[in-house]
Image: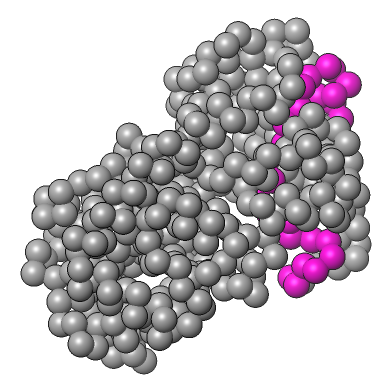
Amino acid sequence: MSGGVVMVCDVDLGVPDATRTHTVEVARGFAGEGLDVDLVARGPDPGLSGVRYTEGAASDAGRRERLTGVNGAAISRLRERRGEATRCYVRHEWAQLPVLTAARTLGYRVVTQVDDVAYGRGYRGEISPAADYPRRGATVAMGRLAHGVVAVTAEIKGLLVDDFRVPADKVAVLPNGVDVERFRPLDRGEAQAVVGLSADHDHAVFTGRFAEWVDFDTILEGFAAAARDRPRARLVLVGDGAERDLVSGLVSRLGVEERVIRPGFVADPDRVVAYVGAAVVGLSANRPSLRARIGVSPVKLAEYLAAGRAVVATDIPGVRETVEASGAGIVTPVDVAAFGAALGELLDDPARADALGAAGRRAAVERLSWPSVVRRTLPLFRD
């Protein structure tokens, strides 16, 4: 494919979270499709082959500096690249409306990617009308300016269409993807040796941020219930974040200190792969009160599937569809007893767990690899 694309993402590339992963992998994917890529974001240069990076603001920039820096750098790149690049990809943020307007004025084909709608009707977070209504207006304008929109869940598409009048035929539901070369099935024993886990134990694993939307109550209480009659059971929590004190309190209250392994934040992605490979089951649980409205498309879920590990997950839009469509595991109600029972079933039958994991791996390769996500994004530019 010829031509170029200017990507604008108000994302801190110095923070190894899901937003960074999405930004970097989409940029890499565009380059892999033969496009000449310019990326405007915040923080350090990710050093991607075939991608020119412009730092719009530093990692520690304040809100005003971010707005002026990212918008200013992006509009400059759009002017400089006009004629050579014909596409503009913007991670949706209400404050990037100047970028969308400039891109359309300069004749670019525009695609926006939306992974949250933290405002508008039905939003339960704390937001004042003075902040809420500009965001609503910017989203309506985005729907008119963009040629195509990527929504990472069906629920987000529904909100964009029903509440913000974005034409349905502009919006494609494309979940977060995964690097299927890095996250791949490993021999469990070898992976256990790499990360120092005992082969005498059966491990369940959670990876990711310790964020407020993660339902650690169900994860830890469900594990405690499953572990009660299974002395080999161990839970590995790979990550860190704002909810670490909640996690510590739950572990102590449930009396599972000797059964829960907490490596903390792991910067080396290959070591994260090994932790997942060392497990029998990967766990996912989200608080419906914080996530049901927009659904979820967890990067960790795609990584479990790509690594060939069975999944036990609570029933929330986005997760349910992914797990059921892939055949990769068990979806339970948001209920401790049900979650614990499902986890216990798979810990008792690793062969069944591995068969489910193999189905997940096939689905990840076919539908969730980042190159496949990018290839399904390209038609939205409607060249």
Which residue: 56% across, 26% down? 375
Q: Is residue 330 visible?
A: yes
Q: How many marks?
A: 0
Q: Residue 107 magenta-drawn?
A: yes
Q: Pick whichever, 102 or 186, lies toward us.
A: 186
Image quadrant for the C terminus? top right
Image-quadrant location for residue 353: bottom left
**Range drawn in magenta:** 101-125
Q: Is residue 35 above or below residue 306?
A: above
Position of 234 with respect to 57 (left or right) is left
Which residue: 37% across, 56% down? 328
Q: Is residue 152 above or below residue 332?
A: above
Position of 251 with respect to 156 (left or right) is left
Image-quadrant location for residue 105: top right
Which residue: 73% across, 49% down? 157
Image-quadrant location for residue 340: bottom left
Query: In the image, residue 124 lies at what x, y percent?
Result: 75, 72
Quick one: which residue is furthest to the left in this view?
200
Query: In the image, residue 338 lies at what x, y percent?
Result: 41, 81
Query: In the image, residue 113 lies at what x, y percent?
Result: 68, 40
Query: In the image, residue 248 lies at what x, y percent?
Result: 38, 80
Q: Pick whichever, 11 or 378, lies toward us.
A: 378
Q: Is residue 43 above or below residue 296?
A: above
Position of 91 with respect to 1 (left or right) is right
Which residue: 53% across, 13% down? 34
Q: Is residue 78 visible?
A: no
Image quadrant for the N terminus? top right
